[in-house]
Image (cartoon, grey):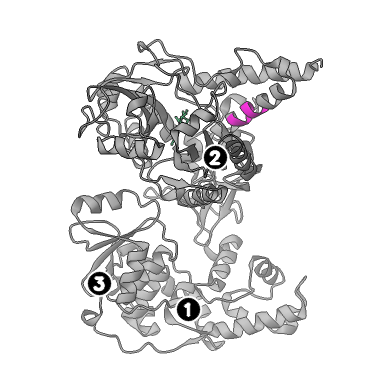
Amino acid sequence: MAIPDAALERAAELRAEIAFHNRQYHRFDAPKIPDAAFDALMQELLRLEKEFPQLLTATSPTLNVGGPISKAFSEVRHERPMLSLENAFSREDIEDFWRRLQQKIGDHEVTLVAEPKLDGLAVSLIYDKGHLVCAATRGDGETGEDITANILTIGDIPQQLEGTGWPSHFEIRGEVFMSREGFKRLNECALLAGEKTFANPRNAAAGSLRQIDSRVTRERPLSFYCYGQGAYPSEDLPSHHYQLLQQLSAWGIPINPEILRVTSIEGCLSFYEDLMKRRPTLAYDIDGVVYKVDLLADRERLGPPTARAPRWAIAHKFPAEEALTRLISIDIQVGRTGALTPVARLEPVFVGGVTVTNATLHNAEEIQRKDIRAGDQVVVRRAGDVIPEIVRSLPDQRPLTSAPFEIPTHCPVCGSKVDHSPEETILRCSGGLFCPAQHKESIRHFASRKAMDIDGLGEKLIDQLLERHLIETVADLYTLSANGLSALDRLGEKSAENLIKALDESRHTTLPRFLFALGIREVGEVTGRLLADHFRQFEDLMAADTASLEAIPDIGPSVAQHIVTFFQQPHNREVIRKLLDNGVFWDPLPARPATEALPLAGKVFVVTGTLDGFTRDQASAAIITLGGKVTSSVSKKTDYVVIGKEPGSKASKARDLGIDLLLEEDFIHLLKESGHEPSGT
Ligand code: IVH
């Protein structure tokens, strides 16, 4: 079959692009596009070559595993080629893999070893009489770079093996990687020193390993996990891969503990799902899992490798966390407290398993620092359940007409001047409740679940109530009637009745909820509870001055000032009076139990990372209710550190200080033991 011109052209284009990105990635450790975008180019070329086999040439990138080898290091010829892995992206791909295995080795139950696929770089280590004598990168798969001097600086990697019984000469392979924490620290230092930062932990690890001066490598937080053997005397090999890993571990070689034997497709998929769920809590980046035939004799029966990969293993990739798309515009949203937040409007893109159309840009300064502009091609990242963010833009592809982002000087909604306080990176509209955006957000906040909990009063409805002047302030909500509401668009009689019922029910509230609902700056749920607990009588809080507020533990000068200012404003006092006149009430608080008598009295907690079952405020509230204290930084005075996902440096500091670390389940256990009942507030 003749090859259509379009296919010829596209293949040439793809090869040129792949070669360019290969160079960026392997030689300069500075990729221009996300891995998934590179994978997509490769997949497209593979598809073309499959459809038109005449397109395939010996030099096609689809047949070559790695990048070119650098001239900076001396060359090492691998005793056995270092291959890559075939990729699977779906359940069907895994079913195909199992089918192929069943065809060749289906005469007995097949066991696979499932392992995390670390996102670092492959290295080969050679041990001679128990000594590490040579370390090399993969290079082009046949020949790598000699990085022995640099590998010797990695504390994780034994220079001399422990125990006995190792073969006199053998090779192992594994991944050198950088933990997320190490990467963050490295980039922070680079920023401070005005040096170039790395795009991700993988590039940081690669850049660190390819340093000419190994003293630089020594300073870099590199780690290593071994995942298999290279050239290894067959008489010394255990029968199974799993046993080999245990054996290597006994000699002091680090092995990833997250390894499991599975015997079915379902087993593979549940390992995959589980790890994908826990991915954000792992200390290092992974981009999928690898399934490998456990019995080494079975591997032989599967036949020789394809051009790039063995037949006994497959990489099951996670949905990409990064993708490329176009930034349509940068909109500015105005929050309840006037904070201006830039939001990126994107051409829809599938990333991290969902279609993303909006992403956060953090703050205006960051947009300028990263020089992100409307119209740019941008890298969008969505990791776990974290809000999608723009990592960087690709300025090379930017239209000549594009203009840098300008920090707004006036509120885009009400036109008031924007304040930019020197202590904060946040820009704030100075319009207060005069600003329609702030006004609307304050009503939404008032109605929200943790505040007055007015079911059914959503954003659209609030918009209409304001537009039609049915309400001016939150107090007017309690004068609405089902009749009046039925005039609103798309609000049926039943919904109107339900809303009135919800409003009526919300009248009976609690003092902490009421305080939170008022929307005083810096008064969140926890502070609301703290204030209610301290003052007990609302009138006493309204009359408090800054000195008496600051005397309360955990109330700083800034919150104290916000509280006093809030209650001084006649408008706020008027709204509060009307709310109470319109029937809002709460049960008087019972006499305060002596804090000393409470189960967690005297115990100081720090909460860090994301918990599954609590917001950080809820966890703090539970601790405070039981008499404990919550502080924000870890010190010798801390008794417990509660750690959620992505705990950050507080957890390591606590570990260094020998403070008790509580995982979420330990924390729940402690709360239960202390008689805490989830309040559902
Ligand atoms: S086994 C014959 N196991 O993924 C290839 N590779 O995309 C043997 N990788 O070059 C590789 N974690 O750098 C294997 N648990 C793991 C891995 C792993 C990460 C890397 C490795 C390999 C690349 C292939």
In the structure shown, which secondary structural element does the residue marked by tag 3 occupy? loop
Query: Disc 3 marks which residue?
Result: 551
Q: Judge the density around disc 3: few (<14), some (14-19), many (≥20) Cα neighbours within 10 Å.
A: few
Q: Do the residues labelled 1 and 3 touch (CB within 8 Å)?
A: no
Q: What stretch is highlighted in magenta?
A: 39-44
Q: Which of marks 2 and 1 is in front?
A: 2
| Quadrant in the rendering for residue 668 | bottom left
Query: Disc 1 marks which residue?
Result: 573
Q: Position of residue 575 (x, y in %)?
A: 53, 78
Left-right relation of 238 to 461: left
475 vs 160: above or below: below
Q: Position of residue 333 (x, y in %)?
A: 58, 53
Query: What residue lies at 45% left-to-right and 15% top-to-bottom?
Result: 142
Nearer to me, 582 or 512: 512
- Residue 429 painted magenta: no
Q: Nearer the viewer, mark 2 or mark 3?
A: 2
264 vs 539: above or below: above
**Residue 292 in view of the camera:** yes
Q: Position of residue 624 (x, y in %)?
A: 31, 73
362 vs 469: above or below: above
Left-right relation of 34 to 355: left
Nearer to me, 194 or 113: 113
Q: Looking at the magenta stretch, what is its main secondary structure?
A: helix
Q: Are marks 2 and 3 in contact (CB under 8 Å)?
A: no
**Residue 563 in view of the camera:** no
Q: Which amino acid does label 2 sit on?
A: His
In the structure shown, which secondary structural element does the residue marked by tag 1 occupy? helix
Query: Disc 2 marks which residue?
Result: 316
Q: What residue type is labelled 3?
A: Ala
**Residue at mark 1: C-beta within 8 A of ligand 1:** no
Q: Distance between the residues labelled 2 and 1?
A: 61 Å
